[in-house]
Image: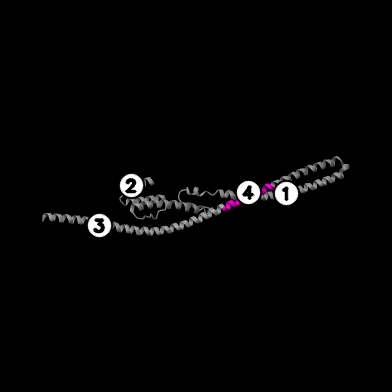
Amino acid sequence: KTTADKALAANEADIKAKQATKDTADQTLTDANTAKTTADKALAANKADIKAKQATKDTADQTLTDANTAKDTANKALAANEADIKAKQATKDTADQTLTDANTAKDTADKALAANEADIKAKQATKDTAVATLEKATKDEKESKSKLDKDNESIENLNYKDTNDNSVKTVSDVIAAKGFVKETKVEGVAIIANAHKSETIDKFKKEWEAVLGKKYKHKIELKNVETIEEINNKANGLLENKVKSQSLEMSLENLY
């Protein structure tokens, strides 16, 4: 009987211990189901957020494409205008030479008129011809100069536009700055930079969520975090809430 009583007492103690183990397992399962429900809701919200950010990126990509197209068009127009100016410069050079020749002819006629008054009538006719040539050359030179000035003004405007285009920082330069990009006078630049910055942060957050998901054996989402530092802090906080494994700590250390 004594032996049976001891065996019974030992059995009851074993049953009590196993019941405690079962209660702990039940609570763990309940907590896991609650966490899964929360994660599912967060996942749905995150998918909607990703869709919105993708739309923003698509808009930014189109803006960049349009800007590049406009710049290419301006460059082609500039090249065509420079060729036209070169041709008009050649015309002006010819007009200048004609004017020089006309001045020379006029000087020759004046000297001949002073030296030979007897032949003044014939030489006056020569002078008149030279003067007419001079007037025509002067008129042509003025018209050519006026056209050249207008063309120079046109190419200056195009050069200003090209310089303005080149003053826009590249997206990579903008993203290198801390935080998100403020709105600038250049349409599309801030949108593009912020879209790529968001993608970088989202990728970093998803890497952490994948590591945490492996640890907890279900999907984890880091909510209400917007910077790399906030993501690290929240992820490390989640790790400290459960018993850490040495292999996971080493994995995280190697990864980040």
Using the image as rendered, state which of residue 212 and residue 233 is in the foreground: 212
Using the image as rendered, state which of residue 31 and residue 180 is in the foreground: 31
Residue name at image x 12 percent, y 54 percent:
3
Question: Alpha-carbon distance for marks 1 and 2?
Answer: 87 Å
Q: Percent position (x, y) of residue 230? A: 39, 51
Image vertical order of residue 256 relative to residue 12, above or below: above
Q: Would you call the spot at circle 1 few (<14 residues within 10 Å), some (14-19), or many (20 or more)?
A: some
Badge 3 is on which residue?
Answer: 22
Using the image as rendered, state which of residue 230 and residue 62 is in the foreground: 62
Badge 4 is on which residue?
Answer: 79
Residue 171 falls inside the magenta stretch: no
Specify the quadrant of the image occupied by residue 254: top left
Three-letter residue code for mark 2: Ser
Q: Would you call the spot at circle 3 few (<14 residues within 10 Å), some (14-19), or many (20 or more)?
A: few
Q: Main secondary structure of the magenta part?
A: helix
Residue 187 appears in view: no
Q: Percent position (x, y) of residue 134? A: 78, 46
Residue 138 appears in view: yes
SS for dot 3: helix
Using the image as rendered, state which of residue 72 and residue 12 is in the foreground: 12
